[in-house]
Amino acid sequence: MACSIARTMDVIGEPWSPLVLRNVYVGITRFDQIQQQLGISRKVLAERLRWLVGNEVLERREYAANRHEYALTERGRELVDLLMVMVRWGDKWLAGDAGPPVLYRHHTCGGITHVTLTCSGCGNPMSGDDVDVLPGPGTTAPHP
Amino acid sequence: MACSIARTMDVIGEPWSPLVLRNVYVGITRFDQIQQQLGISRKVLAERLRWLVGNEVLERREYAANRHEYALTERGRELVDLLMVMVRWGDKWLAGDAGPPVLYRHHTCGGITHVTLTCSGCGNPMSGDDVDVLPGPGTTAPHP
DNA sequence: CATTGTCAGTTCCTTGAGGGAACCCAGTCG
DNA sequence: CGACTGGGTTCCCTCAAGGAACTGACAATG
């Protein structure tokens, strides 16, 4: 389908995938660690990891004889952006009275902050209300 | 689970949900329109729409006698941010030679641009590499 | 006013993917 | 040399997704 949302969902749309990526991002990189932290079935975890490696989001490394760990590739590191936007939305709308389960300290300013979306061209805020959606070169059907 | 990613995935993690939201965002708001555009099963679409309405991401309106349409709530409009980040990643890594299927024109500057992530505090770029992850007030288990 | 069409679903059946538990093999620690 | 750990695979079983057909209210049409 000529739709970048569908294509992205095809790579990481399965419900466990973002959680697997988050774990790798925060340093939970080994099979059993990930399995125990998430409570995911071993079978499904093995499938997901193969899929994510095959799609070049993760890479599999042998850190000792027959001992493997997973690491984010460049593609994978850019997916962390997506996770941070998910976290922001979940924090804002679903955290309830307990408040957010995690906080981010930004290296540049040292503050506890969150992500916001801005325009790559002018640097001003950019949301769904601030754009026109136009067909691009990769369009096939007359839909976004 | 005390994890904003898991909570967000619980609401919109099912593979069709982001595509449904995108359709509503671009003006494809009626049951049959959405079903035909996506090729989703009517049964699953009915379930998804109920779920999204129940989670206050969409609202259901009667625009004529027994004719309904769906619209984004405020929660839903903020989820469009997530879609735009997905689009950006898909455009960058999965579009191939054909180029992106859609383009965004930013109202503020008029340019064809894309979203980037910045810090809510200082306005500088903010990615996964630029932050420390700390436990927040809503933490239960010792994990992000 | 019977017929056709549209919209918004619901019902029923079948198949495939996810979960659980158990098993397996290589290395290594005591 | 036995037990343990890491990193999976195999088997079975259930549950949810897909497809196709049916329903029921309203609107326009001949």
Image (cartoon, coloured by chain):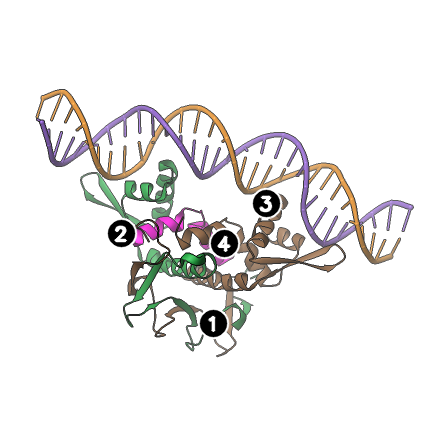
Chain colours: A brown, B green, C orange, D purple
Q: Amino acid at mark 4?
A: Ala
Q: Is residue B57 visible?
A: no
The residue where tag 4 is placed is: B6
Q: Chain of mark 4?
A: B
Task: Identify the disc placed on residue A44.
Answer: 3
Instruction: Find out whether the residues at labels 2 and 1 contact each other: C-beta distance under 8 Å.
Output: no
Say if the magenta span includes residue A131.
no
Per the image, label 3 sits on a secondary structure element best described as helix
Question: Residue at the spot x=36%, y=41% of the render?
Answer: B39
The residue where tag 2 is placed is: B27
Disc 4 versus disc 2: nearer the observer: 2
The numbered mark, 2 or 1, whose residue comes first in the sequence reads 2
Q: Residue furthest front?
A: B97
Q: Which residues are magenta?
A: B1-27
Q: CA distance from mark 2 to mark 1?
A: 32 Å
Question: Residue at the spot x=57%, y=62% of the render?
Answer: A73
Q: CA distance from mark 3 to mark 2?
A: 36 Å
- Choose between A125 and B8: the one closer to the eye: A125
Is residue C14 found left or right of D3 in the rendered image?
A: left
Q: Amino acid at mark 3?
A: Val
* Predominant SS along the magenta part: helix
